[in-house]
Image (tube, grey):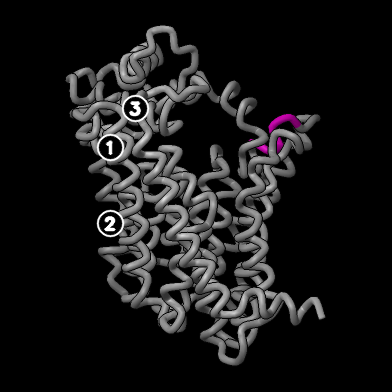
Amino acid sequence: MLARAFDKLVSAPILRLFALAGVVGWSVAFLAHAITLRNPLQSDGRPVGGDFVSFYAAGQLVMQGAGRQLYDARSQWRAQREALRAPEYPNFCPFPYPPTLAVAEAPLSLLPFVPAYLAHVGLCLAAILAGLRLLRPALRRLAPFWGTAASLAALFYPLTVSVTCGQNTAFSFLLMCAFFAGLRSQRDLRAGIALGLLAFKPQMALLLGLAMVAAGRWRVVGAAAAVGVGHYVLGAIVVGPDWPARMLALLDAFWELNTAQHTSLSISLPAVLHGLSPAALRNVLLLGVCGLLCLSCVVGWRGAAPGGGISGPLAMTISATLLIGPHALWYDTGLLSLAGLLIANDALARGGPFPAWLKGALTGVFVLGPTFHAAAGLGVQPLLAAPAALFLIAALAQARRGASAPARRETWKAHLE
């Protein structure tokens, strides 16, 4: 009886209605919020757009020709206070990204803070829509339900809130969609450029880059490396040739404090296990789990077909990237919208009805989104379960597919031995 009730609850007409209501409701709510915005600081003392102040201030430093100060904590803090028109603002949000992001955000700093934030939201929404547009031709099995599937992906709570809290998850989403679309159509150059651009947030590109090397996708690797050199050259011009060392020094200075403050908000295993004692046990656990995740992704890519067989490995890699990244917070799980679409499309491609257990699992991950608010009380971020679940689902599907193909079975055997 419960199974039948659940099946009706997630039937196509109900999901279509939910998606439509969600898109309309979010749009009306945000427009009402935008109309009432006046000051950079809200009534509770927090800045409008949350972390956006760090990007806005970094862009201001670039526009003012003060790029050499980009990784100076005092200069960043001063720029943030000026942006918020609050000389006594007590909080500081570091900008620990490559200079490419500061240069990209610089034009927004020509606007007053609130209009710049609203423009940033608009750019994030455009990035999500563009990413979904790139996916549509590649995910053909979802075509009959594309409006509903795309709307639900966009409404995944961490992705939606990342837009309004001034984060850049939407841009990572777009670049990962472009990477998948390029590989799916066997246009490795385009995929490599997207992967290289994704290095504006380096931890999001590292595991994918390793997987491309292991899979022997050298055109992808070469294009990504060329764009990576572009990141460095642009940073050298704007900030100075030693910018990587200075960025790492800023990261190191705030690593312990930042990790301790964000443990309950993090979905990253290094941060979740940060306080585990003794340190030797923690390091062994991290090395073992992270090594297994990386090995699984590499094996998945090595056994994937050049075109259509990449959905599972990419879903695994997205999930693993969130789990092993040194600084992945709850809003980064917005990238799981792409992983969920890939898994759903693969399930439909296998023929037959959509598996009930998978429908329940994807629904559970979707519903899990708002639970990040419970992290403070629980002491751990519940959303950690989302990338873990999708990794397991994608890995099991990939293993089953490999078991039915002798060549892939031999690939798995060779790697595991």
The residue that mark 3 highlights is 38
Q: Which span of residues is magenta-colored?
A: 271-275
Q: Quadrant of residue 374?
A: top right
Residue ID at (42%, 33%): 49
Residue ID at (49%, 75%): 304
Q: Position of residue 369 (x, y in %)?
A: 61, 52
Looking at the image, can residue 345 be seen? yes
Residue ID at (42%, 76%): 146
Label of residue 133 in the image: none
Label of residue 193 in the image: 2
Q: Is residue 186 left or right of residue 258?
A: left
Mark 1 / mark 2, whichever is N-terminal: 1
* Mark 2 Cα shell of 10 Å, populated few (<14), some (14-19), many (≥20): many
The residue that mark 1 highlights is 100
Mark 1: secondary structure: helix
Task: Look at discs 3 and 2 and give the one toward the viewer.
Answer: 3
Q: Quadrant of residue 65?
A: top left
What kind of residue is marked 3? Arg
